[in-house]
Image (cartoon, rainbow, N blue to C red):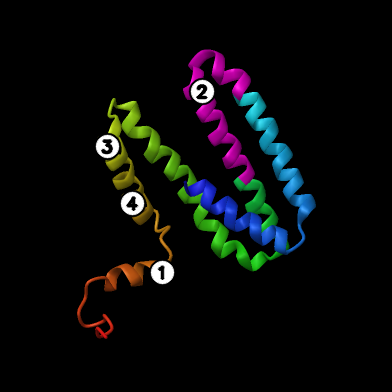
Amino acid sequence: MLTAALLSAWGTALVAAGRYRSMLHASVAAAVVFTAATIVLVPAHGAIGGAIALLLAELALLAGYGRSLVRWQPGLIAIVAPARRLVPLGVLAAAAPLLVGLDGLLAAGASGLLYLLGAAVLDAVPADLRRAVGRWGSPATDPPAP
């Protein structure tokens, strides 16, 4: 979900900026990654290998989009930089519970908790979001009810 959300937002920005050639290059690179990963992973791991190949392709596309955004507007590095830490963290957080044998709801909960803890440790949570979360439920900062 994280990669899909970032791809949607970053892709929209690139289309609005007319950066079609950059998008094409990123898409071709992602297709190459997907093809190579599929050839290697699917025979050995079946559907799981296919899912991993798709995730690797999405990460390649995300890297290409991020690079294109920063080349177009260098000031956007502040937006793109946290993704360099959060996307690999998301992959690790999703894989770790499965590697130790958890499944279902327990694996999903463990993944979410690992991701949140990792984002906090890596200081990859934007300051405005940290401030907003810090105010949740605080009667002193909540607006009065209508």
Name which of mark 2 and mark 4 comes first in the sequence: 2
Q: Which residue is mark 2?
A: 49
Name which of mark 3 and mark 2 comes first in the sequence: 2
Marks 3,4: beta carbons within 8 A: no
Q: Nearer the viewer, residue 123 or 12?
A: 12
Q: Residue lying farthest left?
A: 139
Name which of mark 1 and mark 2 comes first in the sequence: 2
What is the CA distance from the residue labelled 3 to the residue labelled 2? Answer: 22 Å
Residue at 59 percent of width and 19 percent of height? 40
Q: Quadrant of the C terminus?
A: bottom left
To which quarter of the image does residue 30 belong? top right
The disc labelled 2 sits on which kind of residue? Gly
**Which mark is in front, 2 or 4?**
2
Marks 1,3: beta carbons within 8 A: no
Q: Position of residue 4 (x, y in %)?
A: 53, 47
User: Is disc 2 placed on a helix, strand or loop?
Assistant: helix
Residue 24 to residue 51: above or below: below
Q: Which residue is mark 4?
A: 116
The disc labelled 3 sits on which kind of residue? Leu
Q: Which residue is mark 3?
A: 105
Marker disc for residue 127: 1
What is the CA distance from the residue labelled 1 to the residue labelled 2? Answer: 37 Å
